Image (cartoon, rainbow, N blue to C red):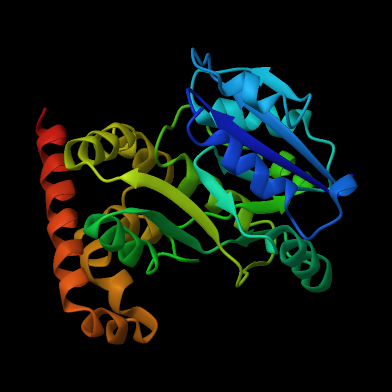
Amino acid sequence: MMVSVVITTKNEEKHIETCLKSIKAQSFAAEEIEIIVVDNGSTDATKEISRRFTDNVFDFGPERSAQRNFGIGKARGKYVLYLDADMIVSQGVIKECVKKCEKDNCVALYIPEKIIGEGFWIKVRNFERSFYNATVIDCVRFLKREAFLKCGGFDENLTGPEDWDFDRRISALGKTAIITDVICHDEGNFGLKKYLRKKQYYSKTFEKYAEKWGKEDKVIKKQLGFWYRYFGVFIENNKWKTLLLHPVLMSGMYFLRILVGLNYLRLKRG
């Protein structure tokens, strides 16, 4: 088996079929792909839909870090691609990932992410996300299973920054790179309250994450600091040109970033 695709789910009947169909439609040999779905107690039809595509459907929780660790522990592939249920994998992703890892001996790869859905704010979200690819705000998504096991997988004490923590540990084991094909992340209809609640939930263990690496750590200062999160990541490597070419999207992005920041400060003050 060459590639194991691990998908974490919870009440995702709206998205899971599209996600699974995109994996089945890959240009890579179907017999070299196994699909593993790790569900966290869904009360809808998520598991039933998943079983139409794979026999590897498991129940495990309580959070996505534990689900990913469990699923990758069950995997048989040389490589692993881990996904959320609301992601759609472009047809050439797995083929390009395997080719790049085999050719360049990469331990892990970043995959560009495109936010899709309806309305202006989804365009704003996609604009913002485009600046994060292969930065310290991003996380590798395709990796050697051997490297995953060596670095210890995801820290199950973190929910939110576990991606950043994992990215740092696996990247220390060898070469990483980014591919050109994309994964689409379907965020549907944007709701401001829902968006802020999600951001607040994932920020609850930021302090624990910072303590793990040290608050004076250079990467921590970028990921959690004001300058890089609000300016640096958007202007480095000549990205400022893209920023200035889209003033309306830029304004919308900073509106959301400011609200997220204020929400985080309110949470810290308790």
* 99 shown above or below 212: below
> Which residue is drawn at the image coordinates 74% and 30% (left, top)?
73
| Residue 180 percent coordinates (x, y) | 60, 72
In the rendered image, which quarter is residue 130 located in? bottom left
In the rendered image, which quarter is residue 18 located in? top right
Pick the quarter of the image with the N terminus. Answer: top right
| Residue 208 percent coordinates (x, y) | 35, 34
The one of 67 and 21 positioned closer to us in this rendering:
21
Looking at the image, residue 229 sits to the left or right of residue 58; the answer is left
The one of 49 and 251 positioned closer to us in this rendering:
49
Pick the quarter of the image with the C terminus. Answer: top left
The one of 256 and 73 positioned closer to us in this rendering:
256
* 150 shown above or below 101: above
> Which residue is drawn at the image coordinates 42% and 39% (left, top)?
212
| Residue 263 percent coordinates (x, y) | 13, 41
* 205 shown above or below 151: above
> Which residue is drawn at the image coordinates 19% and 71% (left, top)?
250
Looking at the image, residue 140 sits to the left or right of residue 35; the answer is left
* 212 shown above or below 127: above
> Which residue is drawn at the image coordinates 15% and 35% (left, top)?
268
In the rendered image, which quarter is residue 166 located in? top right
